Amino acid sequence: MERLNGKIALITGGVSGIGLATARLFHEQGARLAVTGRDRDSLSRAQEEFGNDVLVARSDAGKLSEIESLIGQVKERFGRLDVLFVNAAIAKPAPFVFVTEEQFDETVGINLKGVFFTIQKALPLFTHGGSIIVTTSIANQMGSPNFSVYSASKAALRSLVQTLGLELIAKGIRINAISPGPISTPMFDRFGLPDDMVQGIKGEIERKSPIKRFGTPTEVAKAALFLATDESSYIVGDELVIDGGMSLL
């Protein structure tokens, strides 16, 4: 049985990592899809993979004008939304004393402002209830040196999901979060660190992990699918942790 048959879903940050794995799973489960990203090569690969059935849109998640344009494209193509997965985010690690205003504004602009206004602008497309899913991170509850801005932005999202859980339920819209731990995505490759340093960091994370490995994007996608369906109909304003036990340490 296709668990999202007939549903319209928008996934931001949907052309790589967790977003792409979720797009594939939603598509397999019968959803009609729109996905976004900023990298032109990733966008092209996604369009080639999904074909014309899926709306693949270049959109900067931190710019209000591009968010509004995206929602307009979704409305024109599909007319409504049933599922919104707000997944686009960036992480630019730096020691606290070296964080610049530019780094702060870019991270908060995409990870908090972008999520806030994507939800706000998408709300009119929800006509008969629906599900909104936000990607947070276990960094929002754990001390994460060099990730001060990223962690704070994700903690703000956890609070936002709780507040909107109460505000939106009267409209029949459920909002929840998924909070991934260490997941095998291209994120580490974007930090600009030498390969040997990246491998050392990954090895240390695996050593500390209770489950002794990274999670896969598909494992997170399955949680997003659960929250997107009526199987999670009594879950509101919650945060589902997917971290192999890391946050228990």
Image (spheres, rainbow, N blue to C red):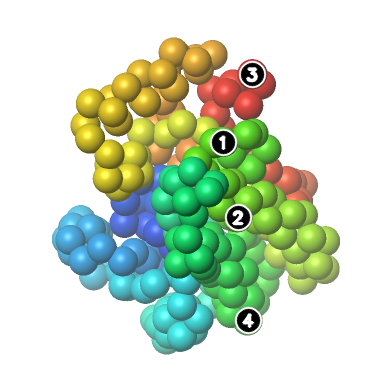
Give the residue pinned by disc 3. Answer: 249
Report the Cα–Cα distance between label 2 and label 1: 13 Å
Give the residue pinned by disc 1. Answer: 144
Of marks 3 and 2, which one's residue comes earlier in the chain? Answer: 2
Of residues 185 and 168, the one drawn nearer to the viewer in this rendering: 185
- The quadrant the C terminus occupies is top right
Left or right of residue 164: residue 29: left
Give the residue pinned by disc 2. Answer: 153
Q: Secondary structure at mark 1?
A: loop
Give the residue pinned by disc 4. Answer: 124
CB within 8 Å, label 2 to label 1:
no
Of marks 3 and 1, which one's residue comes earlier in the chain? Answer: 1
Report the Cα–Cα distance between label 1 and label 4: 37 Å
Of marks 1 and 4, which one's residue comes earlier in the chain? Answer: 4
Indicate the amino acid at tag 2: Ser
Q: Position of residue 173 (x, y in %)?
A: 71, 64
Indicate the amino acid at tag 1: Ser
